[in-house]
Every structure is written in C-alpha cells, then in structure tokens.
Image (cartoon, rainbow, N blue to C red):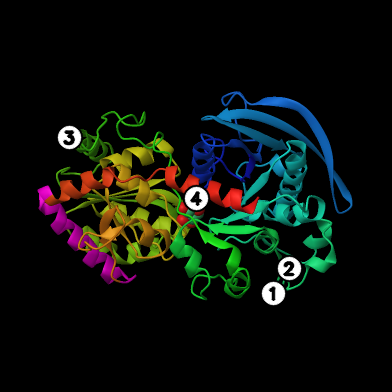
Amino acid sequence: MKLLFAASEIFPYAKTGGLADVAQALPAALAKQTDVLSVMPLYDFIDREKFALTSMNESFQITLGKDIYEISLFEGMNRGVRTLFVHEATLCHCITPYGNKNGDYPSNDLRFGIFSKTLVIMAEMFKIDILHLNDWHTALAALWAKEVLPELPVIFTIHNLVFQGLFPRESVERLGLSEHYFTPEGIEFWGKMNCMKAGIAYSDVVTTVSPTYAKEILLPEFGCGLEGFLQVHTSKLHGILNGIDTVLFDPLNDPALTKHYSAEKLSGKKSNKTLFCKAHGLTDADKPLIVFIGRFTEQKGLDIIIEALPKLLAMKLNFAILGDGDETMAETLMSASKNYDNFSILFGYNESLSHRMYAAADLLLMPSRFEPCGLNQLISLRYGTIPIVNDVGGLHDTVRDIDDTDSSICGQGILLSTLSSTAIVKAVKRSLKLFASKKHFSKISKSNMHCNVSFEESSKSYLKLYRKTI
Ligand code: GLC
C-alpha cells in the first residue's frame, strides 16, 4: 500500500505547532509498516542545503481559475521517510507559513489551493493508493480528488477545528471551483468559503486526534459552528490518539540536554533542573519547578494562568514560561517577571530550550480550554514531569488523576476540577503536596516514564483504517 501523507508543516523543516510534530512522527511510524511518501510546501525559509533537499527535475503546470501556476518538485529524507516538497512562487515566497505580524497572508486561499490541487496531481503521478490530508491547508484536495480521481481513497485529519481556512466568497471563482460547491452541504459557511468543510464533506474518512475530541466537536461548545455539519458526517468520523517520536524525545539520548537520565536513574533530572534555574535566574532550585510551554492563546488557558499568577507566585515554587503569541499576554507576563524572583518568562519558539525545560521541570501546567490531543503532556510523561491538566479532549484521554485508581490510562497527573484560576491554584497546591512526599512523587514520575507515548499503537489504527477505506 502506497500512502501520500500531506501537511502544510513537517518538523524539522517548518513548525508552528503540534501539526508539524505529528506530520513527522506518524509517517515515521507508518514507514516501518508500509510505503509512505510525505509532502509539504518548500517555503523559501527552508534551508535546502542544511536538509540536503534536491530537485526531482519534475515540473508541471496547474490551473486554478484563470491562472496557470508553475510547480516543481524537490525531495529529501526525514528520519526514514521520503519527503517531497512542492515549490511554486505564490505558495513558497514567505517568511513563516501562514502570516506575519499583520495577520494571515491574504493570498492563503490561493497558496493552499495551489498546494491542494498539486496533491491530486501527485497522487496520480506517484500511483498512490491512499491520500491522507491534514487540516484545512490540504482540505480542498479532497474535493478535487473526487472530481478527477473518484476511486482514490481520501482520509482527512482535523488537528484543530478552530482553524478552518475561511475566505471571502470570491475565492470560489479565484480557485476555479464550480459554484455548485457553494452550498451549506458543501463549502459555504455563513457566506464565506470554508476549506475545512471540503475536507469533511469530500473525504471518505475523517479523523481527529483523540477519541474525546472526536465526541466533543459534535457539541456546540467545541464544534466551532461546524457541530451540525459534523453530525451529518459522524458515521465516517474517528478519533485516533496522537503519539510522539520517542527517539527525538528521549531523556536518555536527547542532544539538547547536558545531563541524560532515565526512570532507572532519575538523578540526572535534578541536574537539569539546577542548570536551568541557574541559567534563568530562578533562585533555590530545591523548590518545585513548574513550567508552561506553548502558544500564548486562550486555547492554552494562559489568560487563566495570568489571573492566577499572583497566588501561584506567592507559593514556594519556581515557575517558567516559554512561548509566543498574544502580545497583551506577553506584556503582562513580562512585567510580572520583574516583580518576582521565582518567575522566568522566555519568549519565542526554541525547540532545544523546550526540551531542556521538560527535563528540568517537576510539573507541567496545561490548563487548555480545549485540546484536540496535546503533545506537551505526552512529552512531559516521557521526561518524568508530572502534568497538571484540564480534563478535556486529548488531555482526558492521556492523563488520569493521581487519585483515580480505576482507569486504563497509564499517565498520571493532576486534573483541574473545573477551568478557573481558583481551580488552577487548588491543583497547584495539590501538586506541591505531592512534591513534598518525595517517594510518592518519584514513583509516579517513574511510572509515567514507562508509559508508551509513541505512535506505535496509533499508527496501527491508522493502517487498519487505510486498509478498510481502500
Ligand atoms: C494542534 C492541536 C493539538 C494537537 C496537534 C497535533 O496543534 O491544538 O491539540 O496535539 O494539533 O495533532
């Protein structure tokens, strides 16, 4: 079976979020069991030399609306996966994948329309048996595939329903789509064109990244206005849990760490903490270290952490945040950090620094409002860092409360009773109590490190689904 796995970002070439990690780790796990080709755009900011990307001497034209676009293909290897790259000027001439300070690029309809249409040509060119699309950037390929390759099985994965790829009505013509698609059953959404709807309507199978999120998105609270539409398509909707690449995320071999460790030899974790605290001005490294890593958005519940901050920082703990996003949140955090010596704020997206933080921390705070799957809690389990999470989506499926003995979930942590700053303070207090009973804390931390958070199991579920769809 030959699979074409398409995403707008794949680690390490381009990454803005968890999609890139999954688009690397899932194909890598699948490649051990079947024939996989990954594909993404060759954005200008990708270092072709560093990643040894070469031209395939393959060029062709595609037509969207009235215009013709020149496509050329490149290739490289990514941890055992042959990865193809689509180059076209409109799509690739950018400094980040989707936008800049001023917002999303206005040409994103065209950019990802070009990418999506190219995917269908590639499916034919490479004699693909199944096409796996991810998120709205690839979703129009499902629609075009139904037109030109009606026999080709297509599977579409929703990584985050919030980002739907909404564009003005005029985009329909701009992309050369027939007007008959512009209906509520098709791609129309409150007068706009909705790319995500194309993925849902025209794929044979729709998956999302955890069983709980697959149920949640059928409700108004999590459905982002698509709950009714998803209900219509519920018979083809599946929830398959994400995993992480346990070779890239391995405290025993992680090149980002100066001290390596394992569940059997946890002492190295303490050295990581001491080093981190020293490097970032946190005094008294014996105090428990809590970290938050991620985008500064309401999804991640950072606004509620900010609300709880004075109470949190009054406790005997160190707190460090790494991330980027909402500027008001960033400014509030910045000024708070000036008033406390137990709080450190680190801006930006820094892969190796994040690894050092997972290794250094005792606890990870992740009070997401919604979480399709979440990878941070999986990484933290792997690094022996106990997660404090809100009980939603993939967090519900991967972390059980330390007091919950009756569960099939391996990972243990502290679950918020509800989502509020009071609940965060309460949960952190509980975590400090746990930290104080050293033996219990390290027992849980070690047992978490033994949980299987890899893509091994889930990749089998995907394979089964591919076979069934074919
Ligand atoms: C998105 C979701 C996150 C998920 C990731 C990979 O970033 O917000 O929950 O883990 O995609 O599927």
Where does label 3 land, which residue? 267
When the figure is inspected, residue 217 is found, relative to residue 48, above or below; the finding is below
Closer to the N terminus: mark 3 or mark 2?
2
Residue 246 quadrant: top left
Amino acid type shown at disc 3: Ser
Q: CA distance from mark 1 to mark 3?
A: 56 Å
Q: Where residue 260 sits in the image (x, y, percent)?
A: 27, 30
Q: Which residues are magenta?
A: 418-439
Inspect the image, locate mark 4, and give the three-letter code of the amino acid beneath it: Ser
Describe the element under mark 1 as helix, strand or loop: loop
Q: CA–CA distance between discs 4 and 2?
A: 28 Å
Identify the image quadrant of the N terminus: top right
User: Does the CB distance between marks 1 and 4 fall below 8 Å?
Assistant: no
In primary-sequence order, the first of circles 1 and 3 is 1
The span from disc 1 to disc 4 (Cα, nearest Å) is 35 Å
- Secondary structure of the residue carrying tag 2 is loop
Q: Which residue is mark 2?
A: 186
- First reached walking from the N terminus: tag 4 or tag 2: 2
Residue carrying label 4: 461
Estimate the x, y position of residue 369 in percent, counting from the top left. 41, 66
Residue located 26% across and 47% down the image: 448
- Mark seen at residue 458: none
Q: Earlier in the sequence, mark 4 or mark 3?
A: 3
Q: Give the residue pinned by disc 1.
A: 190
Disc 3: CA contacts within 10 A as few (<14), some (14-19) or many (>=20):
few
Which residue appears at 61% of the width and 46% of the height? 7
Callout 2–callout 1 Cβ contact below 8 Å: no
Q: Nearer the viewer, mark 3 or mark 2?
A: 2
Label whose residue precedes the other's in the sequence (1 or 4): 1
Which of pointers 2 and 1 indicates the residue nearer the eye?
A: 2
- The secondary structure type at the circle numbered 3 is helix
Q: Main secondary structure of the magenta part?
A: helix
